[in-house]
Amino acid sequence: MKLVMKFGGTSVGTGENIRYVADLVTKYAKKENRVAVVVSALAGVTNNLIEVACQAKKSDEKRIQTFTAELLKKHTEAISTAITSKQIQKEVTQIIEKTIAELEKVLTGICYVGELTPKSKDYVVSFGERLSAPIVWGAIKDLKFETQCFTGKEAGIVTDSNFGEADPLMNFTTHLIRERLSPLLEKGVIPVVTGFIAANQDGIVTTVGRGGSDYTATILGVALEVDEVWIWTDVDGIMTTDPKIVPSARMLPQLSYQEAAEMAIFGAKAMHPRALGPVIKENIPVRIRSIFHPENPGTLITKKANAKVTEAVKAVAMIKDVAMLNVNGAGMVGAPGSYAKVFDVLGKNNINVMMISTAASEANISMIIKRGLLGRAISNLEIALLERGGIVSEVSAEDDVAVIAVMGANMKGTLGVASRIFSTVAKNGINIRMIAQGSSELNISFVVKEKDGIAVVRAIHEEFNLDKI
């Protein structure tokens, strides 16, 4: 098989873990598989880089030097544990030292200028993967396998210039990746590629969004025309719900792309929501596997749902840290473009709307947004729409809510699913604050008070016997 394997921050969190990853990769390479590897930054490093970059605007050089010294210590410790050969240790350490010296210069520049732009922020956070990938490369080389290390830019991933959430230019990217990596795979060389980071057409570093190493893996998978993309993580696969809420939650052996996308958006930690985009078009399977239980085949994500599973509902998820925003106004009734004005205000202030519900009367619209953005949303809507004495008469909010999402491909066309869901919620004496269902019928989402969220998830999981899937 031709495979792309992606390893997240937990998988490469320590030197021991990196050695384990190298053993795992070479185990599959020994079986005449052709393997390309994508790696995230060491656990916690990306968050630390973001924090220090934001502090650098008002910090001093001493704080930057302390941070880079700690970062060097963390990575050199990982090198000494992951790699046994002194020569390879020395080679990787030199790369790490040079990279951290470059990082220190960048942070010092931000400190002097007193400004952190999206462009410079992308450059700073790219260092996490640029420090982890050489260590993984060194560990694989230490096991006597041919391997080469690439940044996403060097591998050929080209994006637009939307720093922080860049989109790949797939035709150009595919051409470059095939030109640079395909000959290596054919020779049995294992390319190790940094996840998350790429470059625009001018060669300036960009990132494809937090958690974007999954995205890098599927981009490579499409470009290299692999048999499967494997996302190695710390869970066995995609579950029927969060096992911390329902201990009897089961792993789902197979899902369709649409089901997996819904579950990723609604909090399934196994994959990044944007990552499925490239593989859907080319129909390349993705497999979610546990690095701690490699004997488990995990969850396979393909074009079609598992035909053997006939249950309407496959999973239930809860999203916390959200708020419900309500906009009311008699002036919205029959006024073309009134909703557009509301969304225009939110969009201009970088506030994403996760869920929408509106009544046929047109006098009210309810939206779910991230809780941390609530203050900004209310103030900007009031300034833009209330003070003009126009279409909106009131903007209100509830910040103690949670979204419950019930999902499954077989919900489409199955009668009585919604009534069972809402009857179950009612039997538990819980009030529903808002409901939304798309025309795909893959997902019914509704809002309850956050204190009731866990009880609702457990009740629905039990009602649809999800522990027996």
Image: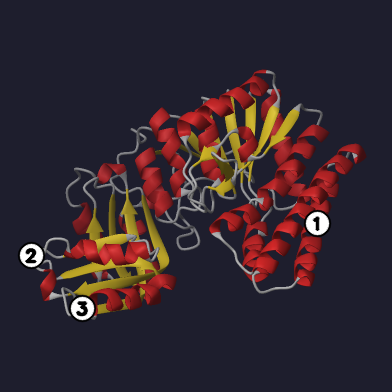
How far apart marks 2 and 3 lie (CA) works out to: 18 Å
Q: Which residue is drawn at 21% across and 56% down?
A: 418
Q: Is residue 192 visible?
A: yes
Observer-side mark, 1 or 3, equals 3
Q: Which of marks 2 and 3 is in front?
A: 3
Quarter the N terminus occupies: top right
The residue tagged 1 is 72
Amino acid type at mark 1? Leu
Cα distance in 3D space between marks 1 and 2: 62 Å
User: Which three-letter amino acid code belongs to the residue tagged 2?
Assistant: Gly
Q: Is mark 2 on a helix, strand or loop?
A: loop
Quick check: marks 1 and 2 in contact, CB under 8 Å?
no
Q: Name the residue under label 2.
A: 334
Q: Which mark is residue 89?
A: none
Quadrant position of residue 353:
bottom left
Q: Can residue 226 be seen in this view?
A: no
Task: Please indicate whether residue 443 sits to the left or right of residue 68 in the image.
Answer: left
Foreground residue, 152 or 158?
A: 158
Percent across and percent down for residue 115 are: 60, 66
The extreme right residue here reads 86
Which residue position is annotated with label 3? 388
Q: In which quarter of the image is residue 281?
A: top left
User: Which of the two residues, 463 or 374, is positioned nearer the viewer here?
Assistant: 374
x, y (%) of residue 459?
Answer: 34, 63
